Image (cartoon, coloured by chain):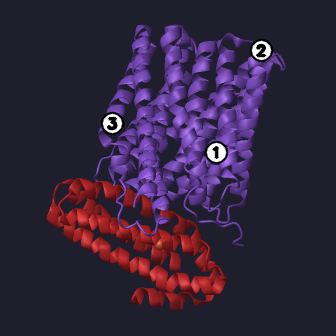
Chain colours: A purple, B red
Amino acid sequence: MNAGLSLEQAPPLSVPLRFFLSAPLFGLAAAGLLLWRGPDVLASRWSAGALALSHLLALGVLSMVMCGALWQMLPVLAGVRVAQPRRTGALCHSLLVLGTLTLASGFLGAGQNAFRVAVLLLGLGLGAFLTVMGHALIRAPHAQDSVRGMRWALLGLAGTVGLGVTLGLGHGGLGLPLWRWPLTDLHLAWGLLGWIATLIAVVAWQVVPMFQMTPPYPLRMRRWLAAGLFVLLGWHSLAVWRGWPLARLPALLLALVLAALALITLRLLSRRRRKVADVSLAFWRVGMRALLLASVIGAASLLASPTAAARLALAATLLFLLGFALSVVNGMLYKIVPFLVWLHLQQRLATRIEVRHSIVLPNMKSIVPEKRSRQQFALHLAALLLLLLGVLLPTLLRPAAALWLADFALLEWNLVQGVLCYRAECRHIDHYR
Amino acid sequence: MLTNFLIADHRDCDALFATAENAASDGDHATASTAFAGFEAAMARHLSIEENVLFPEFEARSGMAGGPTAVMRMEHEQMRAMMLQMRRALDGRELDDFLGLGETLHILIQQHNMKEEQMLYPMCENALADSAQALLERMRAY
Ligand SMILES: [Fe+2]
């Protein structure tokens, strides 16, 4: 019964960090693209530039961090250890990096071969990730709500990858271009809801009560949210696919579920027991407000006239990716990275028995200084607001892109500071006499 | 049964921690110091209940002495060391250090508690089903 249970603390630090440190660089690439190409990029949700941009963000930034974090969270949540974490982590990471870059270059005009290579790299990289994580989650000895929720999220990722591979082969001249429109729509829905929103919801009901000391999420929500999302997603997919009547109903219900998640989280945060307002809390609040707004605007886009609907859907998608998912992910990074640095320093120190009581390790707040993360939060908020205004007034998009560049650069800088602190402290520990 | 008792104990410790932290962030040294003393005592009791009552019983019955409980014991040591540092910061009136250490300790405790609540306690519950009532009495009386 207990075979395979492992309560060990963490995989090697390099495994999650390589994902975390790459993510802001893809954010820089996305912001650079918007700065370079200007308002044309966002002229339509389906323009080649918009597709390059959204994949740089969804794969290069969001999925990058989420994959890295899962490597870290699985032992804590499920008590399973991933075999050979260093090797498999490095493999998935490099395939994801190269695949995302190739895919973006394909959308930007590099030709059919770029799509073929991208499909191969991303299919292998994310396929390997899904295999490793799926295997671990199936073996998990105690299937709690969170383990079950994560299985749903992985299923969402698998669906997204499957649809993406089909679309990518179409772009690569190897598929059926006729299917492109409904498949693109479904690929987006599965990626945003089945993968990103599901995983964030599962993580939220684990970490929000823990980190902020709030009451727990309602039991019914923890039990049914992920499954409910998938029933609606399946209904939506079939309705789009087969042209069922009332095709908009499941999409409206999906918006309603996400709005409920946002409202419940905001309410819990307002009832938190810890009063110390850290930057992570600020990111979560912005993220959940953005999710609420994205759900409302997304629902409005389903009921609006076709021209208004396109603008509204664009605003909802941007709000979801950059306002909701990126804010939450960013807030989590400021908890996870300093803690992991501290934890690994602690473990290193423990091996030096003769000096371990003479060295005082830096605490989390000196590993990544709060002042710098606050500044990055301010940049993030300003960039987000300007981008939303830019949907209405396209001349504002270039200034918004410049703010995003600064935002991602400062995020990378802050994370690198954490790593430099780790290196310096390691030397200190190793050479202390 | 065992699980519920220990989870409730975790929450009680959390509440004392929050009181101390909230007071420290308001600059209220006296309240912080009293609440933190309560937290230290509650934690000391909780950790030794696990180490001296629950874990030995589980290790004997499941035959897993070097496995999960060894990691839990190591994390308890990390917590004790952090609490000592926090006490020193508090007595030296270094409230910023106290808060920074507190943030670190808080996450350490939470990820530890999560492993216990979601995995270790249910395992104990399974392995010790027939002696749970007696064990619970011993924990309450500790
Ligand atoms: Fe414990």
A42 relative position to A289: left or right: right
Question: What secondary structure is marked by label 1?
Answer: helix
At horizontal 38% and vertical 61% (from top left) the residue drawn is B105
Q: What amino acid is found at the position of numbered circle 3 in the picture?
A: Arg
Give me the C-alpha separation between circle 2 and circle 3.
43 Å
Q: What amino acid is found at the position of numbered circle 1 in the picture?
A: Ala
Say whether residue A273 is visible: no
Q: Which mark is residue A112?
A: 2
At horizontal 41% and vertical 25% (from top left) the residue drawn is A384
B68 relative position to B139: left or right: right
Q: Quadrant of the C terminus of chain B?
A: bottom left
Q: Which residue is mark 1?
A: A153
Question: What secondary structure is marked by label 2?
Answer: helix
Give me the C-alpha separation between circle 1 and circle 3.
33 Å
Does any atom of ligand 1 lie closer than 8 Å to the CB of label 2?
A: no
Which chain hosts label 2? Answer: A
Q: Which mark is residue A195?
A: none
Q: Name the one closer to the observer, B89 or B60.
A: B89
Label 2–label 3 contact, CB within 8 A: no
Badge 2 or badge 1: first in the primary sequence: 2
Up-down relation of residue A276 to residue A30 (above or below): below
Does any atom of ligand 1 lie closer than 8 Å to the CB of label 3?
A: no
